[in-house]
């Protein structure tokens, strides 16, 4: 795994935005796999600035997001669809009909998940997947457990993730307890992966990620199966 240690959050955001921008410049009709959470917000801000100031062109880009709460309406300001519109899609010239986020209102989630896998395949796969990492080393919403799932699926969030994500909601009771998420194999099928991590509270997850073991209780360790992963983190996440 390639590792880029940045001095701080701003530098991590700029560094990761540069990798995404280089992907778009080298293949304007690329498929980006995108992530939510507070970690990539700075990267999205940098990309929006690059679009405004340097005319970084998103017009031919397609995006597929990793995950979404379930159930949740797209216009709920805690939905990942809302997040993506707010932090990136409304700020660049991407065609919104080419942006895909799992549907938190799907009536038949299992069918939705199977269709999402087909969609990614029909798009030709993800060229560059952006990942954050949970404090418990989850990726997407692939939570620690005895087993992991390869493909997009409906999952139950662990109490620790519900707790960690409750900071965005009025109360912990408002946090959805389920989510739709790409599976480990869906993520590993991307041609290239970058993992962003910032802050001391991610240090243990980063240690596991770099630990050179495969452990279902630390889902991010599965990234060791991929040949082109770059960790971009700040000093606090790397050194604790
Ligand atoms: C969330 C998301 C993940 C994200 C992670 C870390 O629950 N499902 O995709 O990477 O948790 O979030 P944050 O960046 O806010 O710490």
Image: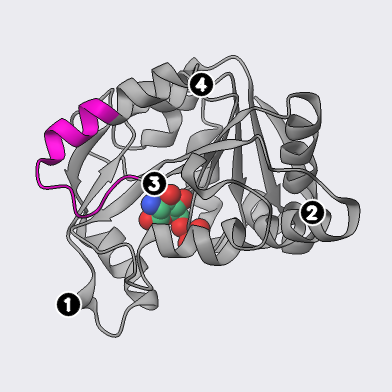
**Which image quadrant is residue 175 in?**
bottom left
Label 4 neighbour load within 10 Å: few <14, some 14-19, many 20+: some
Q: Magenta residues?
A: 102-115
- Mark 2–mark 3 contact, CB under 8 Å? no
Q: State whether residue 90 is above or below residue 110.
A: below
Q: Name the residue under label 1.
A: 173
Whether residue 34 is visible to the viewer of this picture, yes or no, is yes
* Residue 51 disc label: 2
- Mark 1–mark 4 contact, CB under 8 Å? no
Q: Is mark 3 on a helix, strand or loop?
A: loop
Upstream in the sequence, badge 2 or badge 3? 2
Q: Is mark 4 on a helix, strand or loop?
A: helix
Upstream in the sequence, badge 1 or badge 3? 3
Q: What element carries label 2?
A: helix
Q: Nearer the viewer, residue 201 or 70?
A: 70
Q: Which residue is drawn at 21% across and 54% down?
A: 158
- Quadrant (top left, top right, bottom left, bottom right) of the N terminus: top right
Q: State whether residue 198 is above or below residue 133.
A: below
Question: What count of labels does the image hold?
Answer: 4
Front disc: 1 or 4:
1
Q: Position of residue 159 (x, y in %)?
A: 20, 61
Identify the image's colour scheme: rainbow, by chain, secondary structure or one colour.
Answer: one colour
Q: Mark 3 points at which residue?
A: 101
Whether residue 214 is visible to the viewer of this picture, yes or no, is no
Q: Name the residue under label 4.
A: 224
Cα separation, mark 1 vs mark 2, equals 38 Å
Cα separation, mark 4 vs mark 3, equals 26 Å
Cα separation, mark 1 vs mark 4, equals 35 Å
């Amino acid at each position: 795994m390639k590792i880029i240690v940045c001095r701080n959050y701003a530098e991590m955001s700029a560094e990761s935005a540069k990798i995404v921008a280089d992907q778009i410049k080298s293949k304007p009709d690329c498929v980006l796999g995108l992530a939510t959470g507070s970690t990539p917000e700075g990267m999205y801000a940098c990309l929006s600035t690059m679009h405004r100031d340097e005319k970084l062109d998103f017009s031919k880009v397609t995006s597929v997001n990793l995950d979404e709460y379930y159930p949740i309406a797209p216009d709920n300001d805690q939905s990942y669809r809302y997040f993506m519109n707010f932090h990136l899609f409304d700020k660049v010239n991407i065609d919104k009909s080419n942006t895909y986020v799992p549907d938190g209102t799907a009536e038949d989630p299992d069918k939705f998940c199977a269709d999402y896998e087909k969609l990614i395949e029909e798009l030709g796969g993800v060229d560059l997947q952006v990942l954050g990492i949970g404090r418990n080393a989850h990726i997407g919403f692939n939570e620690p457990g005895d087993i992991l799932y390869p493909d997009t699926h409906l999952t139950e969030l662990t109490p620790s993730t519900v707790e960690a994500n409750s900071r965005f909601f009025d109360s912990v009771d408002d946090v959805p307890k389920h989510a739709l998420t790409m599976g480990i194999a869906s993520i590993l099928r991307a041609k290239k992966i970058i993992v962003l991590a910032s802050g001391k509270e991610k240090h243990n997850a980063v240690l596991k990620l770099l630990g050179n073991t495969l452990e279902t209780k630390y889902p991010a360790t599965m990234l060791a199966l991929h040949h082109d992963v770059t960790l971009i983190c700040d000093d606090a996440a790397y050194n604790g």
